[in-house]
Image (cartoon, rainbow, N blue to C red):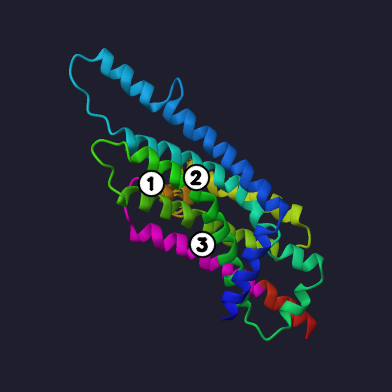
Amino acid sequence: MLVFAIFRKELQGYFASPLAYIVAGIFWLLSGFIFVVLLLGPGGIIQRVAFQEQQSAFPISTDVAYIFLGQFLSTIGSISPLILPMLSMGLYAEERKGRTLELLATSPISNWAVALGKLLGVVTFYITLLVPLIICETIAFSAADPPFPPAVPLLAHLGLILLAASILSLGMFISSLTSSSLISAFVTFALVIFLALLDVIGARAPQPLGDILNHISLLKHYETFLQGIFDWGSLALFASYIILGIFLTAQSIETLRFQRS
């Protein structure tokens, strides 16, 4: 019940925050533009497939829906990490700034419960940002011939949500370390850039370090879900990042509680 109460408080706070609406507006504007360009633009998928069919003397079987889903959600997976720090930056930083974190740290509520409730709130708000995109995708896929299997987009969106939850969990920990939301957002953004470059670093690093860096790459495991493949290893990695963020956040608040005792 305590987790649900904190979750509800955080979620209500996002829907009452002007910054959250600004982030949502930017995200929807960019996503809508990408959706239209990829699907209907002059160099979009439909135009390219139509051109290939005109140039070929034999019928070409192209899964337009699958190609579009992969390109669209791959792009969304690159955009989302750029806006997620703006959602996670105030999870604890505002509590520090308003001097309510000390009350939270010395309260009988478990630090794990607080961190979990806050994370569930911000992840749920992010999921609401995806709803208009899912509606547009559903309309586009309804015209696919043959019908597009629902398992593929479901797994792809699950991967996107797990990717976001992992970044938000780490961002929540960074937010617990400072009273400045801007510093929290900047450090989280730098961390996101580092995590995004793990594949590049791993490709150039000597073994076995290269394999280790590739294995902990969030984007690599997101691509696995994007291909419609459910992999327990990828799921375990996302869960590890999420739990790590919650654990570090709880320890950060526990340190503050120890200092105040």
Q: Residue at x 71, y 51 (%)?
A: 19
Instruction: From the top left corner, tell me how far across and down residue 46 is, in percent.
Output: 36, 25
Q: Which residue is mark 3?
A: 241
Q: Main secondary structure of the magenta part?
A: helix
Q: Amino acid at mark 3?
A: Tyr
The label number, if any, that marks residue 42 in the structure image: none
SS under mark 2: helix
Asked if the residue at tag 1 contacts the one at tag 2, i.e. Cβ–Cβ closer than 8 Å, the answer is yes
Measured Cα–Cα span from mark 2 to mark 1 = 10 Å
Instruction: From the top left corner, tell me how far across and down residue 59 is, in percent.
Output: 19, 21
Residue stretch rendered in magenta on the structure: 226-251
Task: Judge left or right: residue 219 versus residue 11.
Answer: left
| 27 versus 260 height, above or below | above
Q: Which residue is mark 2?
A: 77
Measured Cα–Cα span from mark 1 to mark 3 = 19 Å
Residue 34 falls within the magenta-colored stretch: no
Q: Residue at x 26, y 30 (%)?
A: 62
Q: Amino acid at mark 2?
A: Gly
Label 2 vs 1, first from the N-terminus: 2
Q: Residue at x 27, y 14 (%)?
A: 54
Instruction: From the top left corner, tell me how far across and down residue 171 is, in percent.
Output: 63, 58
Q: Nearer the viewer, mark 1 or mark 3?
A: 1
